[in-house]
Image (cartoon, rainbow, N blue to C red):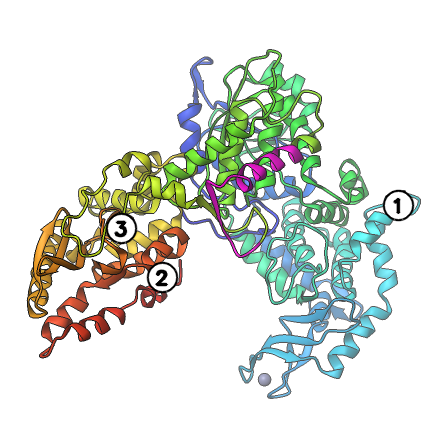
Amino acid sequence: MLPAEPGPLARFTPPLEDGVISTWLPLHAPPFDAAQGRPGSWVLDPFGFSSRLVLEAARAGYRVLVTVNNPISRFLLEMSAEPPSEVDFKAAFADLAAVKKGEERLGAHLQSLYLTACEKCAAEIYADSFLWRKGADAPYARVYTCPHCEDAGERVATPQDIEKAKQIAATDALHRSRAFERVAALEDGDRVYAEEAIEHYLPRPLYFLTTIINRLDSLNLTPERRRALNALILVACDAGNTLWDHPSERRRPKQLNVPGQFREHNLWIQLERGLSQWTETAASVVVEAWPQRLPESGGICIYEGRLKDLAEEVKKAIPIKAVIGSLPRPNQAFWTLSALWAGWLWGREAVEPYKPALRRRRYDWAWNATASNATFTHLFGLCHLGTPFLGLLSEPEPSFLTSALTAAGAAGFDLQSIALRTQHDPIQLLWTCGEHLKRQSNQAEIEDVREAIQAHLVERGEPASYLHVHAAGLVALVKAHALKQKDQEFDEALRSTHALIQTALEEDPRFVHYSNGESVDTGLWGLGEAENERAHLPRAQVPGSTTPPVPSTAFHSAQRESLSDRVEIAIVTFLQKHPHSIYLELEQDLYPRFPGLLTPSMGMFYAVLSSYAQKENGAWNLRPEDVAAARRDELVRITSLIQAIGKRLGYSTRKQEKNYLWEQNGRLERTFYILASALLGRALAETPYPPEQTIIVIPGGRAALAAYKAQRDPSLAARLKKVQVVKYRLLRTLIELPVLTRETFEEQIAGDPLEKSKSQLMMF
Ligand SMILES: [Zn+2]
């Protein structure tokens, strides 16, 4: 499924897809609690990082207990479950705009901070944003769309723009001290950290935000409207910091680092944007604060604090049927800013329990593993044997996965399955709560890792990303209980695991690294020549020999056809049997066939679909020319074309296994392999002739898919380079030529390269 629209603070919340939890939960923990004889099974989210996940579970009829210790995450969760009405949002916004600031209204005053002159018509207009260089005392450019003359884009800053920025900076010290007083008291030891965090606000946005915040209490809003206004201000708080690089590359900041060039948003526009963002989240799910109870129809119960403080009570009172959670990854930027924002919105008391976030500077993976392990350990204490835990690991990277698996394993959770699509999709992990016994740990063996990686690459039939082979190695170590030794600290365990997997890859001639970079975790890893030769087939063909070797069938047992070829076959087979299918049905059919580390990417799905099928009213159908009967007729026609062209060139055509051979005086000249598909790997494997004599013929509609496959598999690309791939269309053109010589033939087939088709697939 497509990821849902990004909501408020989307760059700091885990990018997850809808549908995973509501599909998965009923399979592992029915919403009807059989033991209790009533609906509303309890589910626990011990991390509280993703509102989306929790909401989806609650909507599926579960009672979800969530522990959240970040006040901003808690607010996001409450807001997405029970947002104020659009009326309240609009009223709160209007009240804010109308409040007096001297002789002016606050709305007009704040908007005037962003006035600039249109370069074309000189009208005074509002800039959308200003652009800054790190360390500068004024912006170098502004971005606007002029409502009068429609001039739009990035324009050099005027002397007035620069003067305005400096004017606001002149009174900055006062606003800055007000801003950290709301977070930490004067004598507070943490004040210095609050000051440092506030450095990530320029004078204008800081003035804007403190001006609003200082009027919050005098506004006299109803609690609902105050909540709505807080939500809008929160959007402005995030839009107001310097973590918006320009041009935008680092879209999801993890550290408080000021980019070399960044964007200063017009915060008034951002408040308005917040209005539409929040009102789109319309949802109504019951939310209670612990220890209030929830109805059996489901809902969300929030405990603001850490799991360890709740564990005993939960154990006594609540039968947890399943655990869900988006696993936490270190985010110094979000955690530090959360402490600031909580202070601004709710005052110092709200920051107090969360203050350690201000102090901590470095969050490395060892810290992450140690902290996660503490949570997993408390979780283990309150779960029954076999309780399932679905963990989602978003923005996956090797260290994150190692950290999660090591932390969970050391706490007593047994890994049941792992599904990994690409490094851009969340990894799905399923654990169950293991035996409450003393767990043994074993020494990690490099051979276990190597065998697992090799097995994965054989199974895959094509090179894999480092993340995939790393995951394969990790799973082997999980099975061997060898991720962490009893006496090891997490940093040592993580380091030795990474070293082991990297050595396993680098110091083994069976593995080949396809990469421009030096680093082991870049590019792709595949099986080496020797492995491929063994796996593919003997190509001991003497040019000119008339007795070709029988194509080896050993290939099929030694190495599977490539994953992309198998996915192509599965999708086409499915569409043949189930015309008018929606994308979701296709996924549901394919995922069980390609489980775990073989889970195909959406890019692959769409590459195959766009080659074979068309979408009508949301449903996919094979194109008329790709229905099996049409393709069979086409194959017959192409075969006769090959014979006819051969005849004109003075060759006789003979069929041998799956190949058509052109011969002259018993001597082999050319071989043809005709595909209706883009199964190039199969064509190469079933053509036991010298590559320079081999021509693979594919339908034009398959060329983009073939190019996609070659581009994602450097081993296939290398093998394809040695042969010629031509489209059906070329043969049809050739037969029409009035004069056809062997020379023309050679020229024509050389001028029909596969790469030309690439542009059709740019969007994938
Ligand atoms: Zn203009």
Seen from the viewer's position, the closer of residues 349 and 447 is 447
Q: Is residue 507 magenta?
A: yes
Tell me which numbered mark, 1 or 3, is placed earlier along the sequence.
1
Q: Is mark 2 within 8 Å of ligand 1?
A: no
**Which image quadrant for residue 626?**
bottom left
User: Residue 165 lies in what quarter of the image?
Assistant: bottom right
The answer to which of marks 1 and 2 sits earlier in the sequence is 1
Label 3: few (<14), some or many (≥20) within 10 Å?
many
Would residue 207 appear left or right of 458 to someone viewing this image? Answer: right
**Residue numbers of the magenta segment:** 494-517
Residue 670 sits above or below residue 588 on the image: below
Residue topped by disc 3: 684
Q: Nearer the viewer, mark 3 or mark 2?
A: 3
Q: Tell me the quadrant of ligand 1.
A: bottom right
* Residue 167 at least partly seen: yes
- Who's the residue at 84% across and 65% down the image? 172
Give how far across and how far down residue 553 sits, in percent.
23, 37
Query: Gap in Å between the C-alphas at discs 1 and 3?
Result: 73 Å
Look at the image and tell me in which quarter the C terminus lies.
bottom left
Residue 761: assigned label? 2
Residue drawn at 62 percent across, 12 percent down: 438
SS assignment at label 1: loop
